[in-house]
Image (cartoon, grey):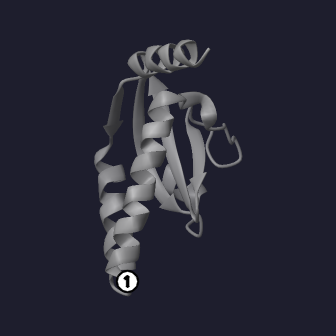
Amino acid sequence: MLLTAKRQWLDLRRAYNELYFSDKAEIDLQEIKDYIAIDNSKAALNLLSYFEKTFDNLAIMPNMGHLNKDLSKKDVLFWNVKKYIIVYRIKNFDIIILRVLSGYRDIISILE
């Protein structure tokens, strides 16, 4: 039973093995890290580590995100991480991280 579950997990991982970041997402992550590091550099690194784990989970289970037509009419999925929202798209079994935004920002305007 355990071997079967592990084999299924590996098959899923192979199906969604590419994770890409838009230029804007990379800038978002850098800005988040820099902002938090002003007060606490360890907390900034911990948050980035948490994001990395979440990105890995999205690569394994890409449909764990949800649509939110109130935030965007585009074909994107959303996943909340602490006070942040990851905006991503699935394209040809690849995961494209489009943005990583603070939930306090005007998400609708940013995604227009």
Where residue 93 sits, quadrant-wise, is: top left
Identify which residue, 8 or 13, lies in the foreground: 8
Residue 112 visible, this angle? no
Q: Residue at x 43, y 64 (%)?
A: 47
Where residue 67 sits in the image (x, y, percent)?
66, 37
Q: Decide if residue 60 is on the left or right side of residue 96.
A: right
Where residue 2 sits, quadrant-wise, is: top right
Q: Is residue 21 above or below residue 3?
A: below
Q: Residues within 10 Å of mark 1 (few under 14, many from 20)?
A: few
Where residue 27 sits in the image (x, y, percent)?
30, 58
Instruction: Return the residue at label 1.
Output: 40
Where residue 11 sits in the image (x, y, percent)?
46, 14
Q: Is residue 105 above or below residue 54?
A: below
Quarter placement of the N terminus? top right
Q: Is residue 60 above or below residue 34?
A: above
Residue with the most extreme bottom position: 39
Q: Decide if residue 74 is on the left or right side of residue 42.
A: right
Residue 16 visible, this angle? yes
Identify which residue, 55 or 27, lies in the foreground: 55
Q: Decide if residue 76 is on the left or right side of residue 68.
A: left
Element marked by disc 1: loop
At label 1, which amino acid type do we have? Asn
Residue with the most extreme right position: 70
Q: Residue at x 44, y 18 (%)?
A: 10
